């Protein structure tokens, strides 16, 4: 009897111990990154509709926090570099390839055409990874095509299907090292709101620009996995604003860039340091700053170096840059989140500052010189 009681007590103790172990919180579902392609035009008479439709679709989707839109200027730049003609706008395989270059998970392809007197618009959502399609077609109810009406009708059907079929798809499992890093970062960040962030980190390898920055990709991925909303932005206005902050000029954050709370800005470079047998070694240096757009306050800064080796010089340099970004993230991301919360709690404005009108300065008055005394 005594042995039985001891066994039961041991089982209860073990069960209580297991229940006391806190479960790792589930990772927040990152917003679905979407790029809206230019509209394919069925006939020349629909040019105004074809030009307006992509922007209206992007605006409708951008209002929903479940989606994150790729900046139009960045999409246009990639399309120009890839020399994608009108025929490519109708090819889902080409759209998926462009999506890979942009880092988008979904591409929206648009087409307008006329059947008799009726004008139609079609939106096809292409899953970049699987190639799966979601087609939606709507007819304009009026005699003359109305871009706003058609865009709203397309989004009414498109949005719920994107959320159900694409946005709910789980993110690919992380490797063991990344999973441990994310758990540690989530613990360091703690509970509370997180800012909207844009990441700009130009990179160089042996004094030449790197077209697909590894540091930016690593930081953006970790930020999204931690629940931050990462805004893609390559606007030259952003570079100009950051330069003003470093120079001590209190310039307002450009309204055209959009709703961003924190700019993560920095620079990175990698150089080859030698060979060991067939392996090429590279070393990378990274410097990062986080700047609050509302106040211009420097929230945190960090610098890191890292090394890597590979048979390929380019891969070695990329790996070193990626490692420097990951090492910096361990300290940089928690400090960013905590400093931004403290700044917001202290009453500093969150988000871009509105542009204030400049008060004209009155010219200084020149005092009159006393008149010489009259001669007697």
Image (cartoon, rainbow, N blue to C red):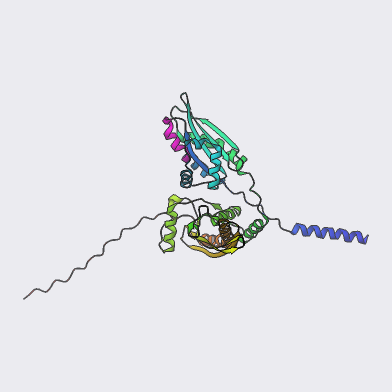
Q: Is residue 221 on the magenta stretch?
A: no
Q: Which of these two is toward me, 7 or 237?
A: 237
- Find the residue positioned furthest to the top: 116
- The quadrant of the picture occupied by the C terminus is bottom left
Residue 324: image location, x then y, percent: 57, 61
Percent of width and height locating residue 336: 55, 61
- Mark yes or no: residue 53 visible: yes
What residue is rendered at 50% in x and 33% in y?
111
Of residue 318 and residue 153, the one placed in the foreground of this image is 318
Where does residue 169 sit, x and y in percent of width and height? 63, 44
Left or right of 179 in this view: 80: left
| Rendered position, 102 above or below 188 | above
Q: How many marks?
A: 0
Residue 67 seen in render = no
**Quadrant of the rendering where the N terminus is positioned:** bottom right
Main secondary structure type of the part rendered in magenta: helix
Residue farthest to the bottom, as pictured: 376
Q: Extreme front residue here?
A: 277
Query: Which residue does the image show at 36% across and 55% down from the upper left?
Result: 357
Relative to residue 146, is residue 233 depicted above or below?
below
Q: Is residue 10 left or right of residue 296?
A: right
Magenta stretch: give its range. 43-55
The residue sitting at the right extreme is 1
Look at the image and say whether residue 46 sits in the magenta stretch: yes
Q: Reply above or below: 55 against 273.
A: above
Task: From the top left corner, tell me how far across and down residue 234 is, in percent.
Answer: 47, 51
């Amino acid at each position: 009897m005594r042995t039985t009681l001891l066994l039961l007590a041991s089982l209860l103790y073990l069960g209580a111990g297991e229940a006391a172990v806190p479960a790792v919180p589930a990772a927040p579902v990152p917003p679905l990154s979407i790029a809206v392609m230019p509209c394919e035009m069925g006939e020349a008479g629909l040019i105004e509709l074809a030009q307006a439709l992509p922007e209206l679709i992007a605006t409708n989707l951008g209002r929903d926090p479940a989606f994150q839109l790729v900046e139009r200027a960045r999409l246009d730049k990639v399309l120009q570099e890839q020399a994608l003609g009108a025929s490519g706008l109708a090819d889902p395989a080409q759209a998926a390839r462009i999506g890979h270059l942009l880092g988008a998970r979904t591409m929206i392809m648009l087409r307008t055409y006329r059947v008799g007197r009726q004008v139609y618009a079609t939106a096809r959502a292409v899953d970049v990874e699987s190639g799966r399609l979601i087609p939606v077609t709507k007819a304009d109810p009026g005699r003359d095509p109305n871009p706003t009406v058609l865009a709203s009708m397309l989004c009414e059907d498109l949005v719920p299907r994107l959320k159900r079929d694409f946005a709910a798809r789980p993110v690919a499992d992380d490797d063991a090292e990344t999973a441990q890093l994310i758990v540690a970062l989530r613990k360091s960040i703690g509970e509370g709101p997180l800012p909207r962030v844009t990441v700009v980190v130009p990179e160089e390898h042996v004094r030449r620009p790197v077209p697909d920055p590894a540091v930016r990709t690593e930081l953006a991925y970790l930020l999204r996995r931690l629940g931050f909303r990462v805004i893609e932005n390559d606007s030259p206005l952003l570079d100009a604003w950051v330069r003003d902050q470093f120079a001590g000029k209190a310039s307002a954050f450009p309204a055209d860039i959009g709703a961003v709370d924190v700019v993560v800005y920095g620079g990175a470079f990698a150089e080859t340091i030698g060979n060991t047998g067939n392996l090429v070694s590279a070393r990378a240096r990274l410097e990062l700053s986080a700047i609050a757009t509302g106040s211009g306050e420097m929230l945190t800064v960090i610098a890191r170096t890292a090394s890597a080796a590979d048979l390929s010089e380019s891969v070695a340099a990329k790996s070193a840059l990626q490692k420097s970004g990951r090492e910096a993230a361990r300290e940089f991301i928690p400090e960013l989140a905590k400093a931004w919360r403290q700044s917001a709690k202290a009453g500093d404005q969150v988000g871009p500052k509105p542009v204030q009108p400049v008060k004209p300065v009155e010219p200084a008055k020149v005092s009159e010189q006393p008149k010489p005394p009259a001669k007697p």
